[in-house]
Image: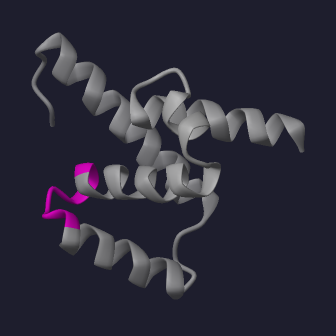
């Protein structure tokens, strides 16, 4: 279980683009909710309100599992790295 917590904290730090400070200052729950918004916005390229509504709807219907969240986070990380290197995203 401790390994899972470490993995979660590492993933949140990547999404928030810090060393874990955001999660430390707030809470894992708030950090995870905010990270979900960040990932959703990056994936669908819509306004925050549209993205959040879509994520909430999928979560309520049980359509988002840890695998989907992980894949979304990995895709976001790839996008961030490409943007920082000035590479085309596609």
Q: Nearer the viewer, residue 27 or 7?
A: 27
Measured from the top left, where is residue 72 in percent x and y?
42, 49
Residue 68 shown left or right of residue 38 in the figure: right
Q: Position of residue 2 (x, y in %)?
A: 88, 38
Residue at x 15% of width, y 37% of height: 90
Q: Quadrant of the N terminus?
A: top right
Residue 18 lies, in percent from the top left, at 44, 24
Residue 65 in the image: x percent, y percent?
Answer: 60, 66
Q: Is residue 32 above or below residue 16?
A: below
Task: Say if 10 sits above or below 60 in the image.
Answer: above
Residue 54, compared with residue 14, is above or below; it is below
Write the residue at 61% across / 49% down: 27
Q: In the displayed image of the protein, which residue is found farthest to the front?
A: 25
In-front residue for pair 15/26: 26
11 relative to 15 in the view: left or right: right
- Residues in magenta? 42-48
Would you say 9 lies left or right of 76 here? right
| Colour scheme in use | one colour
Q: Quadrant of residue 79?
A: top left
Q: Residue at x 25, y 68 (%)?
A: 51
């Amino acid at each position: 279980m401790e390994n899972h917590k470490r993995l979660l904290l590492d993933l949140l730090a990547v999404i928030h683009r810090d060393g874990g400070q955001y999660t430390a200052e707030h809470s894992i729950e708030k950090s995870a909710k905010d990270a979900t918004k960040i990932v959703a916005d990056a994936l669908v390229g819509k306004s925050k309100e549209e993205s959040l509504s879509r994520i909430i709807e999928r979560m309520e219907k049980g359509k988002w599992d840890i695998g989907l969240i992980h894949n979304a986070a990995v895709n976001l990380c790839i996008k961030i790295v490409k943007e920082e290197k000035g590479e085309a995203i596609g």
